[in-house]
Image: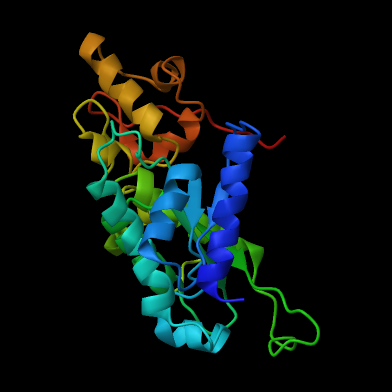
Amino acid sequence: MGGITTQDKLIDTIEIVRHKYAYTGYVHLKLMPGAEFDQIRRAMQLADRVSVNLEGPNRERLDALAPGKNFATDLLDRLLWTQQIRQQVDPDSPERVRAGTVTQFVVGAVGDTDLELLSLTERLYQQIRLRRAYYSAFGPIEDTPFENLPRTSALRELRLYQSSFLLRDYEWEIEDLPFQGEGNLPLDVDPKRAWADAHLRGCPIDVMRAERRDLLRIPGIGPKGADAIIRARRQGRLTELGHLRSIGIRTPQQVAPYVLLDGRRPLQQLSFNL
C-alpha cells in the first residue's frame, strides 16, 4: 500500500472519530512518506500532533537505516510543509490547523553523532517550530540486518533529550553544547552542568544583574526560576540562598557554585562525614 493511500485511510479514520463519534480528545497522526500537501493540511486540521519520523539526521544515516526512503523528498520536505501550511491558514478561519509537529530519531545504530542529531533538531526548532524531537536508543532485534550491533546506552538518549530542551526552552545554541572530539556529549555529566563547570566556576553570574538568557545557563535554574528571579529583584535584593528558595528555586545548593548574590559568593552549608 502506497504512502498516499495509507494517508487517506488514516485521515478517514480520524474523520470518523472526530465527526461520527464527536471525539474531542488528543490525537497524534503519523504523516506517511510521500503524503501529498493537501493530505498533510487536512491531517493538521484534524489532529493535535502530526509526526514525520526522520529516523536519521541526514541522507547518509537514513540510507543505512532504511534504504527505501528518500531523506529529502519523502521525509524532510513533509516536515517543512507543516510550517508552510501554518503560515498560509488564517488562525481565525474555520479551516485553521490545530496540530503541532514532532519527529523521532533512532540513536546509535549507524554511526550517527550527537552533533548531527542536535544540529538538525536545532534547525527544525527554528524553521518549522518543531514541538519536540524524540530520541530512541537503538536496541538490536533478532533476524534483522542490525541484530549483531551493540545496544545504545540509555544515558546517551537522556543526554540528547537534555540538550534538545536546552535548545528549545533555554535559549541555547548548538555551539554552546559541550561536544567532545568525536561529536558526542559526555555521558557522566548533564550538558548544562558540564558547560557551567567549564565557564561559571571561575566567573560566576550575578543574579541581581544577569539577563534572563544568562540566568538560564545556571544549573538548577529553569525558565520559571529565571522569571521568578527577575520579578523578585524588582522588589528587593537577593543576598542569600534562602532568598532563592523562597521564590521557588528548589535546589539553591546546586545553584551556589555558579552565582554571586549581591556581588558575593553565597555561603554554602558544609557537609560533615561523622
Q: Does the image show residue 159?
A: yes
Answer above or below: position of 80 versus 241.
below
Left-right relation of 87 to 96: left
Please identify the quarter of the rendering in which residue 122 is found. Answer: bottom left
Q: How many marks?
A: 0
Where does the C terminus fall, quadrant-wise? top right
Please identify the quarter of the rendering in which residue 77 is found. Answer: bottom left
Rendering coords of residue 131 (x, y %):
42, 48
Give the residue displayed 56% in from the left and 72% down from the top: 107
Where does the N terminus fall, quadrant-wise? bottom right
Closest to the observer: 224 or 102?
A: 102
Closest to the observer: 256 or 105?
A: 105
Rendering coords of residue 101 (x, y %):
43, 52
Left-right relation of 125 to 8: left
Q: Does the image show residue 182?
A: no
Q: Residue furthest top?
A: 235
Rendering coords of residue 238 (x, y %):
30, 18
Colour scheme in use: rainbow
Give the residue displayed 49% in from the left and 72% down from the top: 33
Closest to the observer: 205 or 171?
A: 171
Rendering coords of residue 88 (x, y %):
23, 49
Q: Residue furthest right?
A: 142
Give the residue displayed 32% in from the left and 61% down from the top: 81
Closest to the observer: 239 or 162?
A: 162
Answer above or below: position of 271 versus 77.
above
